[in-house]
Image: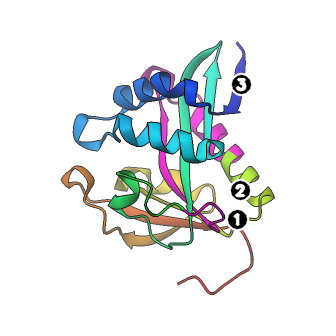
Amino acid sequence: MEVIIRTARVSDLEEIYSVETSCFQKQFQISYDYYKLALNTYSKYFYLLFVDHILVGFINAMPTNKKDLTDSMLKGISDYEKDGNNLMIIGLMVLPEYQHHGYATRLMNRFIRVSREEGKKRIVLTCRKELIDFYKKFGYIYQGISDSVLGDEVWYQLKLELDDDDDYQ
């Protein structure tokens, strides 16, 4: 079995969106148009994981200087800042039939390592309650209930500090 992680290309759009729609119910899905725009703007923050040449999962994030992940970041790129110090994880997903094989962990580890190497200050994400402990394994700190109301769900925000700057509240 061959496992490869690489950055995304615009030509990966159809496969990326197929994974999105396979992993999330309609009310939680990010739009096709969003992915198209994001891939054309900041594809270097999309990491794709292939198993035997099949896209089975990915992680993507938006660089910004904002400190909280908001619903506007899930719908468009108005908060995108090319040289932003923070990375807002828009999604981390693995196809259901490939889950529980460590692929999400591999994607997150790669993402954290590269973010540190690039000098980013922090990574922020939101998740459902049942995933909080998964993210804590990577050093993420629970910050409380997010303002996000995507799909009329309660979301929880976590952050991972990548440097020693302690001015983040």
Q: Which residue is mark 2?
A: 115
Q: Quadrant of residue 81?
A: bottom right
Q: Which residue is mark 1?
A: 120
Q: Residues within 10 Å of mark 3 (few under 14, many from 20)?
A: few
Residue range highlighted in magenta? 81-110
**SS at mark 2 in the image:** helix
Q: Which residue is mark 3?
A: 4
Q: Residues within 10 Å of mark 2 (few under 14, many from 20)?
A: some
Is residue 104 found left or right of 118 in the rendered image?
left
Of the 4 image quadrants, the one containing the N terminus is top right
Across and down, in percent, residue 123 comes to 59, 62
Instruction: For residue 127, say whether it is visible.
Output: no
CA–CA distance in space, label 1 to label 3: 24 Å
Q: How many marks?
A: 3
Q: Quadrant of residue 64?
A: bottom right
* Disc 1 to disc 2: CB gap under 8 Å: yes
CA–CA distance in space, label 1 to label 2: 5 Å
Residue displayed at 19% across by 54% down: 152
Q: Which mark is residue 143?
A: none
Asked if residue 49 is positioned above or below residue 39 in the image, the reply reads above
Residue displayed at 62% across by 87% down: 167
Asked if residue 109 is positioned above or below residue 153 in the image, the reply reads above
Q: Residues within 10 Å of mark 1 (few under 14, many from 20)?
A: some
Instruction: For residue 72, say whether it is visible.
Output: yes
Residue displayed at 69% across by 53% down: 112
CA–CA distance in space, label 3 to label 2: 19 Å
User: In the rendered structure, which disc, 3 or 2, sits on the residue that comes first in sequence?
Assistant: 3
Asked if residue 70 is positioned above or below residue 76 in the image, the reply reads below
* Disc 1 to disc 3: CB gap under 8 Å: no
Q: Quadrant of residue 168?
A: bottom right
Amino acid at circle 1 = Lys
**SS at mark 3 in the image:** strand
